[in-house]
Image: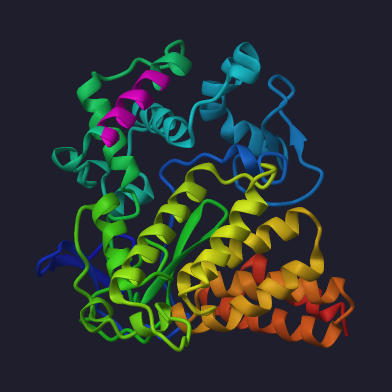
Amino acid sequence: MKNEGIAGTERFASPGKGRGLRAVKHFAVGDLVFACPAYSYVLTVNERGAHCEYCFTRKEGLSKCGKCKQAYYCEIDCQKGDWPMHKLECTAMCSYGENWCPSETVRLVARIIMKQKVTTERTQSERLLLLSEFEAHLDKLDSEKNEMNQTDIAALHHFYSRHIDFPDDQTLTVLFGQVRRIGSTLMNHSCSPNVIVTYKGTVAEVRAVQDIQPGDEIFNSYIDLLYPTDDRNERLRDSYFFTCVCNECATRSKDGGKMALQKLSSPPQPEEVRKMVHYARNVIEEFRRAKHYKNILFPTICELSQEKMSSIFADTNVYVLHMMYQAMGVCLYMQDWDGAMSYGEKIIQPYSVHYPAYSLNVASMYLKLGRLYLGLERKTQGVKALKKAIAIMEVAHGKDHHYVTEVKQEVEELK
């Protein structure tokens, strides 16, 4: 069955994976496979003031909503365009003040409910995939996830009850389950994906990062691909309820490099390595839940964790790299540019090996390094790093994306 609005692809029953998407024409590396405007979206609180609330354009001099003074817009047309959704929050933000604190997930669900009430025709995104086709996996949720759903439903009622007539709690539970797994819908997952999803404002763009032949299934990645096979699959089971059986998982071809150990006179025993992996993953999870560079203990914890891991793991080990990345963030926050550059130089080469080609994580690290070099008056190295970032971004974002244009202009001005 060909997809309405996606020339060159078709939906099909993917063996062992349920619904899938495959190519019916050739796509070269960098080709746009398809693009689709978001059905509904919210700008995160952290990005407010830097991006337009409606079109997500990033620029200076945005105008703020005269009532709540928290939402910012490019122009009056954007403000008018966003009003049907923003009015859900505007009055409430004024009323609650600092106590206005629904999560992004709660805010998104509120907008989806409102969108469903006011939309009479299928949107472009619904012509590709209906919200009702999203998997909620309620039967697979543990007590913690069930409790999270109930907390979100309570927050939805608390913050939005004056503006929305809600469906029953069971329907809301399904909707929250679907929203949490929006990434796992039209395309199946692979740890060696042949496409990447990026965004141009509120439009999702899917571009080929491998050569795709007619008949090939189109695979995206749902998770960060830095980590070894067992770690990746635990994350997939926890969030998406399946175990990946892609070629990368079957061969574990990168696991040796990702789990590199120190060359010691007496190699660590397997049990020691297992315990250190367990420690590293616990530390990473703690950082993920509570990371805050303003926390006075954060730099110390980061340094001690890195030191402990380095007693067994090599500097190219992904868990040590994770702690180096956190340490780099601390240095940037504290404006220790030399320290940040030092960590970035240690990270970039292993990243280039561990991640798939055209990874935005690698491009981001080249951008950070390039700008650090330039700030430290190392122009030649800075330009070289920025050009490497551009080479990745031109494939992942497309050559006409404003991110690419901005970095190219930055390089041009250095000539």
Rendering colour mode? rainbow
Residue drawn 57% across and 40% down?
44
Residue drawn 65% across and 53% down?
300
Q: Is residue 215 above or below residue 94?
A: below
Nearest the viewer among 411 and 201 is 411
Residue 356 colored in magenta in the image? no
Residue 145 colored in magenta in the image? yes
Q: Which residues are magenta?
A: 144-155
Nearest the viewer among 183 and 256 is 256
The secondary structure that dominates the magenta segment is helix
Rendered image quadrant of residue 407: bottom right
How many marks overall? Answer: 0
On the rendered image, what quadrant is the C terminus found in?
Answer: bottom right
In this rendering, position of residue 337 left or right of residue 158: right
Rendered image quadrant of residue 383: bottom right
Nearest the viewer among 223 and 25 is 223
- Provide residue 156's location: percent of width, then percent of height: 41, 21
Residue drawn 27% across and 63% down?
233
In this rendering, position of residue 396 left or right of residue 26: right
Q: Specify whether residue 407 is in view.
A: no
Nearest the viewer among 38 and 352 is 352
